[in-house]
């Protein structure tokens, strides 16, 4: 386990939380908060890195099978997804517009994590809307074992990425503004290069991890990476959103991931604190639960005569999500993960 990367998951999950707080108050309807959707790009790139870190060598040497890999990913993704999906459905997360058949089609698409392939917001954002990103993760996991032959020579993987990147730049340039979200933000196929970036970063990490990097050098590397990411983040308002949905952030996210994966600097020491690591461990629960909590609060506010200031409600809601995420992780995610692995590996 690379503790710093686990901790970073928590930080970027908080950024996604901040990006959705605009539904509570207009104070959060600014670039600083709403650009937090970059957290999703980070998760996709991180996924490529961590999956390669955990499984590349095992699959290369056939110490695990493709089936075992896929079972592990199913056990990780689906239990909490289905739980939050049923909760969202029970809370009215999707409004029936064309009768029960229409509702069932949307529900089935969400249930099987195929909703993000349908270029309609009422599909990919229906029920618990953050789950659209799980459709992308599912595609990544399906494809990963078949990419293993390319990892024996990183140049082949780099060529594949370069070809995909060129197609993406061309496609983005010619896509009308009103269609960019469905084609470039939520579409699993067009988000696949994010995952490849992570896999490529792992190949670079393998070459750097045993280098004699001093504490000072590691600290400078980390501080520089944070500065680069911050520069991209704050300048992003000047960049067309279609590029910011993925390719614009490849470089700064890669700098963050690579620098902190080495765990050689001062910021890594801070991120190695157990509090941050636990935050990273519960980040999946946090991600899938947070918007349900925010939306419930908004609905309560609509019917309530009591108006609570955002600087009180947001911290309370944040702590509520943290508490629910802890309960989910320790009393649902981990037991369900273990049970499903046991059941499917029989």
Image: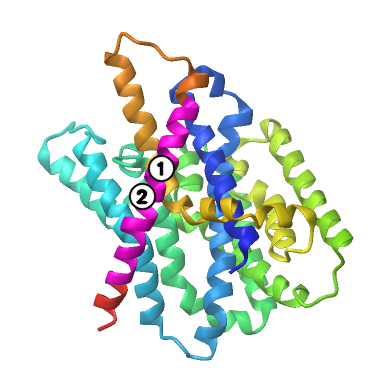
Helix, strand or loop under label 2: helix
Q: Which residue is mark 1?
A: 323
Residue at 67 percent across and 58 percent down: it is 257
Picture quarter containing residue 233? top right
- The answer to whether residue 245 is left or right of residue 307 is right
Q: Nearer the viewer, residue 314 or 143?
A: 314
Any mark on residue 327, and which? Answer: 2
Report how far apart the C-alphas of labels 1 and 2 lie in the structure. 6 Å
Would you call the spot at circle 1 few (<14 residues within 10 Å), some (14-19), or many (20 or more)? some
Quarter of the picture holding the N terminus: bottom right
* Position above or below: 145 against 277: below
* Magenta: main secondary structure: helix
Name the disc covering residue 70, or none: none
Element at label 1:
helix
Residue 273 among those drawn in magenta: no
Residue 308 appears at what percent x and percent y? 42, 15
Q: Position of residue 139 (x, y in %)?
A: 42, 63
- Can you give x and y, in whole percent of width and height, for residue 116 in the image? 37, 50
Q: Which residues are magenta?
A: 314-339
> Can the viewer see residue 233 in this picture?
yes
Q: Quadrant of residue 120?
A: top left
Question: What residue is at 22 percent from the left and 35 percent from the top?
Answer: 91
- Relative to 190, is 173 above or below? above
Which residue is at a point 31% across and 57% down the rendered structure image? Answer: 332
Q: Is residue 328 magenta?
A: yes
Dot 2 surroundings within 10 Å: few (below 14), some, or many (20 or more)? some
**Label 1–label 2 contact, CB within 8 A:** yes
In this view, the residue farthest toward the left is: 100
- Quadrant of the snapshot with the C terminus: bottom left
Q: Is residue 179 found left or right of 80 in the rendered image?
A: right
Report if residue 113 is visible in the image: no
Name the spot of residue 78 as percent of width and height, x first.
32, 60
């Amino acid at each position: 386990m690379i503790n710093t990367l686990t901790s970073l998951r928590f930080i970027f999950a908080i950024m996604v939380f901040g990006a959705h707080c605009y539904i509570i108050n207009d104070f959060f309807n600014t670039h600083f908060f709403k650009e937090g959707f970059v957290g999703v790009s980070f998760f996709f790139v991180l996924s490529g890195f961590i999956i390669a870190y955990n499984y590349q060598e095992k699959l290369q040497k056939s110490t695990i099978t493709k089936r075992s890999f896929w079972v592990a990913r199913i056990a990780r993704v689906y239990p909490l997804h289905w739980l939050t999906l049923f909760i969202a459905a029970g809370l009215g997360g999707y409004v029936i517009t064309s009768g029960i058949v229409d509702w069932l089609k949307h529900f089935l698409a969400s249930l099987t994590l195929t909703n993000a392939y349908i270029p309609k917001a009422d599909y990919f954002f229906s029920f618990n809307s953050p789950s659209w990103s799980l459709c992308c993760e599912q595609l990544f996991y399906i494809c990963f074992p078949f990419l293993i032959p390319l990892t024996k020579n990183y140049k082949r993987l780099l060529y594949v990425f370069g070809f995909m990147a060129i197609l993406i730049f061309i496609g983005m340039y010619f896509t009308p503004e009103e269609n960019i979200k469905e084609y470039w933000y939520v579409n699993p196929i067009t988000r696949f290069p994010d995952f490849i970036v992570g896999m490529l970063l792992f190949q670079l990490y393998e070459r750097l991890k045993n280098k004699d990097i001093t504490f000072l050098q590691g600290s400078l590397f980390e501080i520089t990476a944070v500065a680069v990411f911050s520069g991209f983040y704050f300048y992003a308002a000047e960049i067309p959103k279609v590029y910011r949905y993925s390719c614009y952030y490849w470089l700064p996210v890669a700098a963050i991931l690579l620098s902190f994966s080495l765990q050689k600097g001062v910021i890594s020491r801070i991120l190695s604190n157990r509090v941050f690591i636990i935050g990273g461990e519960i980040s999946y629960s946090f991600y899938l639960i947070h918007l349900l909590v925010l939306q419930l609060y908004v609905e309560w506010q609509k019917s309530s005569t009591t108006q609570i200031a955002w600087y009180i409600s947001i911290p309370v809601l944040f702590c509520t999500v943290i508490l629910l995420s802890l309960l989910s992780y320790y009393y649902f995610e981990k037991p369900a993960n273990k049970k499903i692995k046991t059941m499917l590996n029989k």
